[in-house]
Structures are given as structure tokens and as C-alpha cells.
């Protein structure tokens, strides 16, 4: 399968401060992103996620290493023509209206004039901003800016879309909308590379992930492979049974007189609890088995480092 | 597109650096060329910004003395540039403006008069400037004093000189030498009677011996001048009549040209040379 | 063309910058002030209006070039609008050139406005349209192009305040080059003198674009200077732009 992104042994340092102290940000990053997949790039703040993305885009020049997009040098114009980018906390020319903004950018892609209007209309529709086409960008809300940012990233119908924290600062509805758009992109055959903090969202949509900590990739692979299906514990919300009787079966998390939340670690004990509740004519309000989440994995890996 | 050379530097960077050096050498050469092209300059063209007196006070918003300073500094530069033709045309105007802006500013009036006298060789203009200064500063004795000096040394118009020394003496604070200068000017104007009066006054009111001595010398000199004049006149008449100089001065009396032979203030006789017909005082006045 | 797109976008952005109109306002005030000044001075009224008018246009044009030019690239980097721009299939030189041409276009429009009012004012006094004033203004424009390129150069790596100071210094040095010439004559021949002479030829001589005195006092202008001054301006500008490009190309946008 063709590689959308192929990074080999990427190194980058910055000279910071008055004494120009060299700080190594990327210490030999290597990763592969397959065509047509949604790839998640995770890491704590300052790990080097944004730096990696900027290297891919040619905004930063690495000291060492190779980056290829669809088999071509990442700096070549054909490669750039197939890429779309949405930066973190996007900021655009606020004196332009949404239409003017997209028109300007489309001129940079040498999109023909007659195609332009159609395209812009479609894009605005896709991101849900068709109402604000004539509104100046300075009047856009955070969520709206995010969406117009997505629109400009999709102007050239890119095969590869790079998103830096696309879900940051959005309300749950906004996040859902963006997630849906991303999934739709995959269905259209595009490759999506996104970095994020919001692990639940990554878990929901990504095929493969890489975890970067302190400038190094500590884990990379398919999501399913990384997270075991093992059930860690079960949370049971029940009522009608005395606390004393449940001792030994699990950990009581909270209680409200007769009703309580019990954390049961052993599989067998779950059966016992259910029997107990039934015999006492109590009620089970909910039963939720918790598997290892990405967050657990992530926290665990970071702690190790 | 960036192609990589063996040493790592990209091809286009080399091209750009070469282009940089090329454009640099071109413009540096062009500078040499443009330096050689002669551009016409008008020296002193800044004169067109010289303010006119009338509206000036209103336009200066309270910074008139600062403006006076600026104009004065500019004027000095302007007058130091000898390539400016006909720059004395506005000399009076310039210094009048400065005085208008800051009437109590002493230096420019002095300097303006100086330039007029020595640079423009125009003592009348110098006096005019000093008069203007006095008009604005009636208590400044220096202005008529200086004017008198210019007139004395450059024009030798002793009537005018007297006028200015008189003006000086009408202002409080004038230096003690002024009356003597005045008296001397009267003498130079050949008004001997009045000169005698003045010097006598000085002699009588002298505060120390030195001044008394000076006055006395001047008195001697005046009498000597008058006496010698009279003697020479008589000798000339004698020569005309007898076609020879008299053997001695007493002959003038006996011939009837003079009533008596005058003696100098110290009661000494005047020296007479019968060969040349010249009369000289017995003592040099200043060495008494 | 991509350069054109960026140029027009820059023009749109610059036109909306309030500083521009503030400076334009002051320039017009100065031109009007020349009328008042002419009443207060002894000189030929029209000469003063021409002199002050041309000086204002030159001075305020330079201020516009400096104040807007130094923000051109810096603003894009500071506000991060440059990220989405440079990630597009566009060469960095196209970006830089576009910015430069955009500001040059803005200055052209501003100069045009000032010139019209200036010529109108002269017309009220002499009842002729003195087209030769435009020659002086044309060379002011050339000078402004050079200043813009310098402002752009500094904008690529320095904050607006520092850039403004550097560019202003460039402007001042450019107009006082004759001082260095006088100084050089007094240095003893030797390495120091050669160095000083080299420096003298390298430093900009903006007086090459100053035809104010000749035009105002109707003095003859040797025709060769027109060509050489133009070439000087063109090549110096190219030099500065190339330098800016070299610096900009290697720049990491953190």
C-alpha cells in the first residue's frame, strides 16, 4: 500500500534565548501513514507534534532526516498541491469576508476563475458556513474560524489533510460536526493526519496512532493493537442492598442511602453481585464494563517516560 | 525547486548569492558615475524661508526667543558661506527680525553690525543696525558707543561721532572713557574752543592723577595745535611777502603779522626751524 | 498569477491601515501649511509652496513606506497567517515579491493623491499646471521603492519597532552621504581610507533621487543623471530584495 507520509529519522533543534542554547525538539522521529487512513498523532504539550507537522509542510527545515509525501519530496510543489493544512488556533486576514478569503487562497492554487465560485459555495456548505459567506472574518466565532480553516484546507481537494488540534476549543456539538467531516473525508479516499489532545475523539475515529513524548515516538500502530480488549473493572450502579453485604466483592465508590456505585474488579464477583441484588429484590441501574482506554495507555506510557 | 549539490548548499542559493554580488557591484559603480555628474546648487537658497517681521509675533506661539536663536544660528551659517552672491541685501532685515523676536538678545545686534562693517564694508549699515538695537533697548549704552567707533574708524565723520558719544553719555552706566573720547572727537572736528572746554571740564572733574595728566596733555595739545596753526599762518603770509622764512618768530611780531608770540601751556617757547618754516611744540604732548 | 494575488491582497490590507490615512492627512496639512508659510516669509511665495510641498510628499511618503513596510512580513509571522499561506504550493520568493509589489502599489496611489492636490494648489497660484513637478515626484517614488525594500528586509527578521529604526537610519544615512565624503578627504591614504571609500560607495546615496532644488528653482538638469539615478535605484532595490529573499528562504517559522 502506498505511503501518504513517510518520515525517516527526523531531527530538529532550536537555538533559543539570548545565549542561543540549543534545544533538541525532535530526536529521530520515524513514522508511516498509509493512504486512505485516519492517523492520530498524540503527545503531551511540548512533545513536538506541531514541530513535526511544520516540518512536513516546509515551514521548518529539519537538520536531518527524510520526509516524503506520496513518494515525492515534501518541499516539491506537486506534493504541496496535494496537501491541505489547518493550523492550531487558526488566524486569518480578518479584514476579508469568507468569500474573499477563499477566493484569495484559490488564486494561490491557480484554480480557474469559473470553477472557483462553485467550489467555494460547495466548501462553505460542507463546513456549514453558507450563511456567513459575506461576513468579515473578524466577526467569526472560534468555532466558525475553525470551520473556515477547514474549508481553506480542502480548497485544492487534497489527498492528504493535516490537522493540528482541529477539535480544540469547540463545544461538543462542534466537535461532533468536525468528526463527521473527517470521517467523510476518509470515505472520499483522502488521508487525514491529525494531532490532538482529546483522546476520546481520537479513539472514535482514528485507524492508527503514534504517541510522541519528548521528541521521540514511543509507540506506533493500529489502535486495536495498542489497546487490549481486557476488561479492567466493572462499574455497577445498584440499590436495595446493604453496603455491608457487598464488602469484599468490590470497592464502594459512592453511596446515597440505599443506592450506590460499586467498582468490581473480578469477573466472578460481578455474577455474585447480580445474584445478590436479585435475591434482595434490589435494582440494577447500570452496569458498565471499562476496558483500557487510550487515555489509560497514554497516561501509562507518559508516566513510564 | 531546490537541487542539492555535493557540499549541501542548494543550487539556487548559489545563484542568489551571485546575483546579490552582481547587483551590489553595479550600483556601487553607478554611484561613482553619478558622483561625477555635476548638479547645480544654489548656495544660500534657504533665504527664501526668512520670515517677514509683520506677522511673525503671531505665528510663533510663544516660542519667539527660540525662533530668534534658530534664525541667528542660521544667519551665522549663511554669512559664513562666501559663495552666496549679494547676501548683504537682507542683512538689516535678518537682524531686525531677530531683534523683533527677542528684543533683549544682545549678541545678534553686535554681530550684525560687525558683519555689516567688516564683511560688507558698510559702516552706515552697521550704524543702522545698532540704532535699531538701541531703539529696542534704550538702556544699552553699548550700541551708540560701538556705532561711534565704527564711524570714527571707517568714516571719520567727527560730527556724527560726537552725536553718538553724546547719545552714549545720556544712558546710565557708560564707561568713564566716553567723555574723553567725546572730547577727542570734538578736537578732531576742529572745534577747538569747545574741545578746550570739554577737556577743562574733564581736568577739573578728574578723579585721579592719571586722568588729570591725560586731560592736561590734551589741553596742551589743543593749545599747541591752535598756536601752531596761527604761527604757520603768519609764517606763510611772511613768506608770501618777503619770499623767505623769518629768521625767528619775533620777526613775525615786528613785521606786524602777529600781536605776540604764543607760548605753550607750560609756558615754554615753540621750536622754530627757519630753514623749513616749521613750528613744533617743545614737548611731545603725551610725554609730559 | 500567484504574485499578483498576494500583491492585491497586500494592497487591500494596506489601504485599510489607519496609519496611512493619518500620514496622508498630515502630508496634506503640510502642503496647506506651505501656503501659510509663504505669507510669513520674504521669499518667492510660489517657490516656498513648491519646496515645502515636495518635501512633505517625500517625507511622508518615506514614513508610509517605513511604517507599513516594517509590519508587512512581521505581522504575517506574528499573527500566524503565514502558516496557511506558505503551506500552499507557492514559492517563498513569490510571497515576498507579492508583498513588495503590493506596498509599492499602495504608495503609488498615495503619491498620486498627494500629487493631484499639490498640483492643484500650485495651479491656484500660477494658473498653470506645472507638470515638471511630477519629475521630482517620480524620483521620490523610486526612492520610496528602495526604502520599501529595506523595510521589507528588516521585517523578515526583526520586530516592527527595531525595523523602523533601522530603515529610518537607512533613510537618514542616505541623505547625509556627502558628510562621509568630506570626512574621507581628511583621512590619510592607506587601508583606512580605502575601507572608508568602499563604505562610502556602498552606503545608499538617496540624494541621487532628489531633484527638488533643481525643479523648484528651475535649474538645468544634466540629462545623464536621469538614466543613472534610475538604474541606481533599480539595482539597489534588486540588491536589497535578493538579500531579503536569502534570509527569508532559510527562515524557520516556529
Image: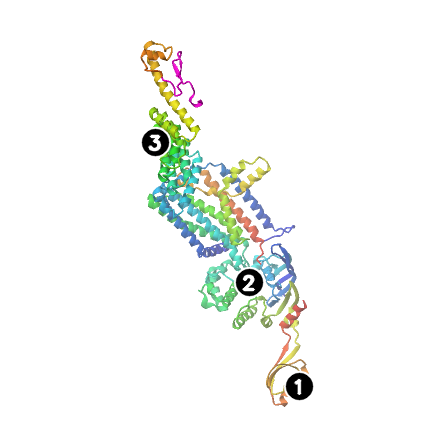
Residue linked to disc 3? B163
In 3D space, how far apart are the residues under numbered discs 1 and 2 (Cα atoms)? Answer: 54 Å
Is B54 placed above or below B157 here? below
Q: Residue A292, located in which quarter of the rendered image?
A: bottom right
Report if residue C68 is visible in the image: yes
Is B203 placed above or below C17 here? above
Q: Quadrant of the C terminus of chain A?
A: bottom right
Is residue B276 a member of the stretch shown in magenta? yes
Have a look at marks 3 and 1 and say if they share a chain: no
Is residue C13 a member of the stretch shown in magenta? no
Residue B98: give x, y in percent of width and height: 39, 41
**Could you say whether the residue bearing mark 1 is in a helix, strand or loop?**
helix
Colouring scheme applied when the structure was drawn: rainbow
**Could you say whether the residue bearing mark 2 is in a helix, strand or loop?**
strand
Q: Which mark is residue A85?
A: 2
Q: Residue at x 65, y 78 (%)?
A: A231
Residue C74: give x, y in percent of width and height: 52, 55
Chain under label 2? A
Q: Left or right: where does residue C94 sit relative to residue B253?
A: right
Have a look at marks 2 and 3 and say if they share a chain: no
Residue A48: give x, y in percent of width and height: 62, 62
Is C17 placed above or below A252 here? above
Mark nearest the camera among 3 and 1 is 3
* Mark 3, other Cα within 10 Å: few <14 / some 14–19 / many ≥20: some
Residue linked to disc 1? A272
* Mark 2, other Cα within 10 Å: few <14 / some 14–19 / many ≥20: many
Please name the predominant secondary structure of the magenta segment in the image.
Answer: loop
Report if residue B156 is visible in the image: no
Count all numbered tags in the image, as a single digit: 3
Q: Which residues are magenta?
A: B262-288
In 3D space, how far apart are the residues under numbered discs 3 and 1 (Cα atoms)? Answer: 137 Å
Mark nearest the camera among 1 and 2 is 1
Amino acid at each position: 500500500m502506498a505511503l501518504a507520509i513517510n518520515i525517516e529519522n527526523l531531527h530538529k533543534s532550536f537555538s533559543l534565548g539570548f545565549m542561543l542554547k540549543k534545544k533538541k525538539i525532535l530526536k529521530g522521529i520515524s513514522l508511516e501513514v498509509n493512504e486512505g487512513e485516519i492517523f492520530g498523532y498524540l503527545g503531551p504539550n511540548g512533545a513536538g507534534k506541531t514541530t513535526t507537522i511544520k516540518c512536513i509542510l516546509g515551514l521548518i527545515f529539519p537538520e536531518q532526516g527524510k520526509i516524503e509525501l506520496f513518494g515525492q519530496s515534501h518541499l516539491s510543489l506537486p506534493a504541496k498541491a496535494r496537501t491541505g493544512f489547518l493550523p492550531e488556533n487558526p488566524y486569518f486576514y480578518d479584514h476579508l469576508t469568507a468569500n474573499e478569503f477563499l477566493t484569495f487562497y484559490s488564486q494561490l492554487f491557480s484554480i480557474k476563475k469559473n470553477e472557483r465560485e462553485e467550489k467555494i459555495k460547495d466548501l462553505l456548505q460542507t463546513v456549514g458556513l453558507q450563511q456567513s459567506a459575506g461576513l468579515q472574518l473578524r466577526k467569526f466565532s472560534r468555532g466558525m474560524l475553525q470551520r473556515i480553516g477547514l474549508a481553506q484546507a480542502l480548497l485544492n481537494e487534497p489527498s492528504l489533510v493535516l490537522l493540528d488540534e482541529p477539535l480544540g476549543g469547540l463545544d461538543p456539538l462542534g466537535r461532533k460536526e468536525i468528526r463527521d467531516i473527517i470521517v467523510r473525508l476518509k470515505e472520499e479516499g483522502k488521508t487525514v493526519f491529525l494531532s490532538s489532545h482529546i483522546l476520546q475523539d481520537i479513539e472514535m475515529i482514528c485507524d492508527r496512532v503514534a504517541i510522541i513524548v519528548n521528541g521521540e515516538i514511543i509507540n506506533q500502530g493500529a489502535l486495536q493493537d495498542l489497546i487490549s480488549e481486557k476488561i479492567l473493572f466493572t462499574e455497577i450502579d445498584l440499590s436495595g442492598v446493604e453496603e455491608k453485604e457487598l464488602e469484599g466483592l468490590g470497592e464502594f465508590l459512592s453511596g446515597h442511602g440505599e443506592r450506590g456505585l460499586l467498582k468490581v474488579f473480578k469477573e466472578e464477583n460481578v455474577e455474585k453481585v447480580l445474584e445478590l441484588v436479585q435475591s434482595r429484590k434490589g435494582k440494577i441501574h447500570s452496569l458498565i464494563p471499562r476496558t483500557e482506554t487510550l487515555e489509560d495507555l497514554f497516561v501509562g506510557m507518559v508516566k513510564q517516560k | 525547486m531546490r537541487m542539492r549539490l555535493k557540499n549541501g548548499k542548494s543550487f539556487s542559493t548559489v545563484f542568489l548569492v551571485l546575483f546579490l554580488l552582481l547587483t551590489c557591484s553595479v550600483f556601487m559603480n553607478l554611484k561613482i558615475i553619478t558622483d561625477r555628474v555635476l548638479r547645480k546648487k544654489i548656495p544660500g537658497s534657504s533665504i527664501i524661508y526668512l520670515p517677514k517681521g509683520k506677522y511673525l509675533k503671531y505665528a510663533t506661539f510663544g516660542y519667539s526667543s527660540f525662533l530668534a536663536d534658530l534664525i541667528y544660528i542660521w544667519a551665522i551659517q549663511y554669512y559664513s558661506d562666501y559663495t552666496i552672491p549679494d547676501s548683504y541685501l537682507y542683512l538689516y532685515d535678518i537682524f531686525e527680525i531677530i531683534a523683533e523676536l527677542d528684543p533683549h538678545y544682545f549678541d545678534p545686534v553686535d554681530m550684525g553690525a560687525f558683519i555689516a562693517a567688516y564683511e560688507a564694508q558698510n559702516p552706515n549699515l552697521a550704524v543702522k543696525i545698532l540704532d535699531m538695537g538701541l531703539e529696542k533697548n534704550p538702556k544699552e549704552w553699548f550700541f551708540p558707543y560701538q556705532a561711534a567707533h565704527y564711524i570714527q574708524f571707517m568714516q571719520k565723520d567727527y560730527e556724527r561721532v560726537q552725536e553718538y558719544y553724546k547719545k552714549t553719555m545720556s544712558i546710565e552706566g557708560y564707561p568713564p572713557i566716553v567723555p574723553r573720547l567725546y572730547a577727542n572727537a570734538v578736537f578732531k572736528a576742529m572745534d577747538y574752543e569747545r574741545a578746550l572746554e570739554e577737556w577743562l571740564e574733564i581736568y577739573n572733574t578728574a578723579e585721579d592723577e592719571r586722568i588729570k595728566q591725560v586731560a592736561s596733555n590734551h589741553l596742551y595739545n589743543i593749545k599747541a595745535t591752535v598756536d601752531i596753526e596761527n604761527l604757520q599762518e603768519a609764517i606763510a603770509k611772511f613768506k608770501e611777502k618777503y619770499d623767505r622764512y623769518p629768521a625767528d618768530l619775533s620777526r613775525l611780531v615786528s613785521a606786524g603779522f602777529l600781536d605776540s608770540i604764543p607760548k605753550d601751556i607750560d609756558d615754554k617757547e615753540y621750536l622754530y626751524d627757519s630753514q623749513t618754516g616749521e613750528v613744533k611744540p617743545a614737548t611731545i604732548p603725551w610725554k609730559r | 498569477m500567484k504574485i499578483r494575488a498576494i500583491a492585491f491582497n497586500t494592497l487591500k490590507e494596506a489601504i485599510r491601515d489607519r496609519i496611512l490615512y493619518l500620514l496622508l492627512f498630515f502630508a496634506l496639512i503640510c502642503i496647506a501649511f506651505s501656503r501659510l508659510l509663504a505669507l510669513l516669509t520674504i521669499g518667492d511665495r510660489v517657490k516656498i509652496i513648491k519646496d515645502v510641498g515636495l518635501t512633505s510628499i517625500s517625507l511622508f511618503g518615506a514614513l508610509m513606506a517605513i511604517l507599513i513596510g516594517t509590519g508587512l512580513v512581521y505581522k504575517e509571522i506574528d499573527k500566524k497567517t503565514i502558516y496557511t499561506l506558505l503551506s500552499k504550493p507557492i514559492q517563498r520568493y513569490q510571497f515576498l515579491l507579492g508583498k513588495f509589489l503590493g506596498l509599492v502599489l499602495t504608495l503609488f496611489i498615495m503619491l498620486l493623491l498627494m500629487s493631484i492636490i499639490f498640483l492643484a494648489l500650485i495651479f491656484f497660484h500660477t494658473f498653470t499646471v506645472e507638470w515638471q513637478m511630477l519629475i521630482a515626484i517620480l524620483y521620490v517614488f523610486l526612492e520610496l521603492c528602495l526604502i520599501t525594500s529595506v523595510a521589507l528586509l528588516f521585517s523578515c527578521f526583526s520586530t516592527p519597532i527595531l525595523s523602523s529604526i533601522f530603515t529610518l537610519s537607512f533613510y537618514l544615512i542616505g541623505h547625509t552621504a556627502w558628510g562621509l565624503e568630506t570626512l574621507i578627504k581628511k583621512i590619510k591614504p592607506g587601508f583606512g581610507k580605502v575601507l572608508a571609500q568602499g563604505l562610502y560607495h556602498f552606503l545608499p546615496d538617496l540624494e541621487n533621487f532628489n531633484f527638488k532644488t533643481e525643479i523648484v528653482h528651475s535649474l538645468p538638469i544634466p540629462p545623464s543623471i536621469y538614466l543613472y539615478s534610475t538604474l541606481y535605484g533599480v539595482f539597489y532595490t534588486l540588491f536589497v530584495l535578493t538579500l531579503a529573499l536569502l534570509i527569508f528562504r532559510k527562515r524557520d517559522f516556529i
